Amino acid sequence: HKEVRDAVFKEHAKQLQALFNGRITVGKSNTAFDYGVYLNATPLKNDKAPVKLRVDLVGSAGEAKKIAEESAAYLDTPEVRWVLAVMPGLEDRLRRAIAIERLENDEEYRRVATERTRAEAARLQAEADELRRNAAADVERAFQGGTLYWAGNGLALESANGARAGRGSQAAPSKTKVEEALRDRISAHYYRFAEGDRTFNPANVEKLFTVAAADRAGLDADV
């Protein structure tokens, strides 16, 4: 059902963009680089950026295997693939919530609604709200796991306690590993960046004005 598939996509897109804003700092100089953020090949941020974070929602082991093989075959591709399985029950929760929410806008229901049916509708709406919250928690848990693929590497991700964590737990371990992989791909793509990567020292700025031009060749390379 397209409406349910769209809802699943929307929930994952919202969480993905909350975790990754398409910009990351790299190197001793903390230079900011943009990277593309994609969900199922759909660009969410920075579609022109050469380095990409691609999250793939898969429904089978076969789909995950295909992505792993693609990553292993194209080692120089400037992208990080993050394979996530759609959490069991997520589609059912969203399908039920959508059906309940549709009732409120149904013209026939509003025409024949009574005080009793309105009370029942309010109860159902509370159920729909709870289903939405549970769906969001499912997606949050999904982003604490999955498998990363980049430059021929594969890494299974786990939450802070070594298992799928519940709502409100920290997704930092997965986020940190994804950022490490992104920095690796950025460094490989912008391979000359390392040559000029220096820690900024404000004192060096003053040297440019106090040291004679003829003597600057002997200054520290960081200047």
Image (cartoon, rainbow, N blue to C red):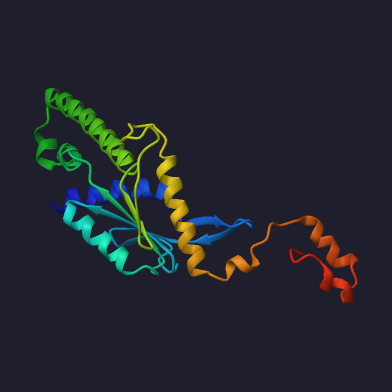
The image position of residue 10, as x and y in percent, is 29, 49
Q: Residue at x 47, y 53 (%)?
A: 180
Determine the residue located farthest toward the bottom in the rendered image.
214
Name above or below for residue 5 compared with residue 195. Answer: above
Left or right relative to 22: residue 132: left
Quarter of the rendering containing residue 31: bottom right
**Residue 17 visible:** yes
**Residue 105 visible:** no
The image position of residue 35, as x and y in percent, is 45, 61
Q: Residue at x 40, y 50 (%)?
A: 17
Quarter of the rendering containing residue 137: top left
Q: Which residue is drawn at 26% across and 63% down?
A: 69
Q: Residue at x 31, y 38 (%)?
A: 141
20 vs 82, nearest the viewer: 82
Left or right relative to 171: residue 186: right
Q: In which quarter of the image is the C terminus?
A: bottom right
The image position of residue 175, as x and y in percent, is 43, 46
220 vs 96, nearest the viewer: 220
Left or right relative to 43: residue 65: left
80 vs 118, nearest the viewer: 80
Name above or below for residue 14 compared with residue 199. Answer: above
Count of numbered circles in the view: 0
12 vs 33, nearest the viewer: 33
Left or right relative to 174: residue 186: right
The image position of residue 92, as x and y in percent, is 15, 40
Quarter of the rendering containing residue 131: top left
